Image (cartoon, rainbow, N blue to C red):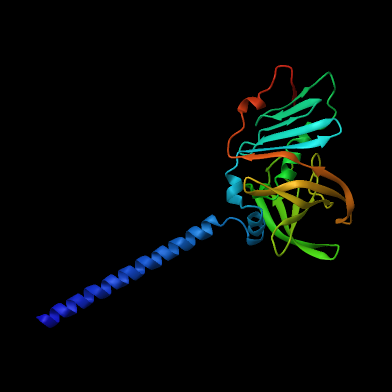
């Protein structure tokens, strides 16, 4: 009888161990599946995001605002990062995209002569690099590295699924420091108003950074002349001041259209 009981206890213990091992295996497998599911970015672009404060920190933010000095005065851009509503305010005009409608309000009787459709979101996009390429609908591929002044930078080619944005045929290449992961260059094509992709890449150098709300963002950027899809020499510098990146949504009233504004069709 004692031997039977002992054998029974041993059988129960073995069964319990097997169940425990099975449960642990299931947990590990589940954790692996969750890791695979939630890891939506390739390693290279994740390294770049992390060196600039992390995509999770960026995704907490609701408002981005910055100022640029233009020939006609200060140009202030304020963007709702979730809806992409945008206010561009200058001394001579105000341009707003309210999520559906793009409109212009001219000031002091001065005619606006730019291309509001092309300019909508343009400088915000350049400023919000590299995080802006964490949007939905982005395709990542390895690009040929860029060598400039004896240093080589690995590249990440960014393209878009059909129907994403105003110019889904646009392409970008982020070049980054292989050691730090920090973004150093942006190559980009312009396809607005054209059919199909472009083979001509323009170049911006990102080498002057500042930290705002835990994110490493541009303090200034340099546009370069280019030849055969290679940067040649610095052409001009654009500085950004009064930078604000906030977890609070902007006041929605700033995007409301006045009666005398011109709607851009």
Please state the total of marks drawn on the protein image.
Answer: 0
Quarter of the view holding residue 72: top right
Please, which residue is most extreme toward the top here? 259
In the drawing, does residue 38 fall left or right of residue 65?
Answer: left
Query: Where does the image place residue 103, in percent across and percent down from the top left?
Result: 73, 26
In the drawing, does residue 43 fall left or right of residue 183?
Answer: left
In depth, the one of 80 and 171 nearer the eye is: 80
Q: Residue at x 77, y 51 (%)?
A: 208
In the drawing, does residue 155 fall left or right of residue 32?
Answer: right
Quarter of the view holding residue 101: top right
Q: Residue at x 69, y 60 (%)?
A: 181
Q: Residue at x 72, y 64 (%)?
A: 178
Q: Is residue 194 above or below residue 216?
A: above
In depth, the one of 184 and 145 nearer the eye is: 184
Query: Where does the image place residue 135, in percent across and percent down from the top left?
Result: 64, 47
Quarter of the view holding residue 174: bottom right
Query: Where does the image place residue 220, in percent across and percent down from the top left?
Result: 78, 46
In the drawing, does residue 227 fall left or right of residue 20?
Answer: right
Please, which residue is most extreme toward the left here? 1
Q: Quarter of the image containing the C terminus?
A: top right
In depth, the one of 254 and 35 nearer the eye is: 254
Query: Where does the image place residue 228, in percent across and percent down from the top left?
Result: 89, 57
Q: Quarter of the image containing the N terminus?
A: bottom left
Please, which residue is most extreme toward the bottom here? 3
Q: Is residue 24 above or below residue 253?
A: below
């Amino acid at each position: 009888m004692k031997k039977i009981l002992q054998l029974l206890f041993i059988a129960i213990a073995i069964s319990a161990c097997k169940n425990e091992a099975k449960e642990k295996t299931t947990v590990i497998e589940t954790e692996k599946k969750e890791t695979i599911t939630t890891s939506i970015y390739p390693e290279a672009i994740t390294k770049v995001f992390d060196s600039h404060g992390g995509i999770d920190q960026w995704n907490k933010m609701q408002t981005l605002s910055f100022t640029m000095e233009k020939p006609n005065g200060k140009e202030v851009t304020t963007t709702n990062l979730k809806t992409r509503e945008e206010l561009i305010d200058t001394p001579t005009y105000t341009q707003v995209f309210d999520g559906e409608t793009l409109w212009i309000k001219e000031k002091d009787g001065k005619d606006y002569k730019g291309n509001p459709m092309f300019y909508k979101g343009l400088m915000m996009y350049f400023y919000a690099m590299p995080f802006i390429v964490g949007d939905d609908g982005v395709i990542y591929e390895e690009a040929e590295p860029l060598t400039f002044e004896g240093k080589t930078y690995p590249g990440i080619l960014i393209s878009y699924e059909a129907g994403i944005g105003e110019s889904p045929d646009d392409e970008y290449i982020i070049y980054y420091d292989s050691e730090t992961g920090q973004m150093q260059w942006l190559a980009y094509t312009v396809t607005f108003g054209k059919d199909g992709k472009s083979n001509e890449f323009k170049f911006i150098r990102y080498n002057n950074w500042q930290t705002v709300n835990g994110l490493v963002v541009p303090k200034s950027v340099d546009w370069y002349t280019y030849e055969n899809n290679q940067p040649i020499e610095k052409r001009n510098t654009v500085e950004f001041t009064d930078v604000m990146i906030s977890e609070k949504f902007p006041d929605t009233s700033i995007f409301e259209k006045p009666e005398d504004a011109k709607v851009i069709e």
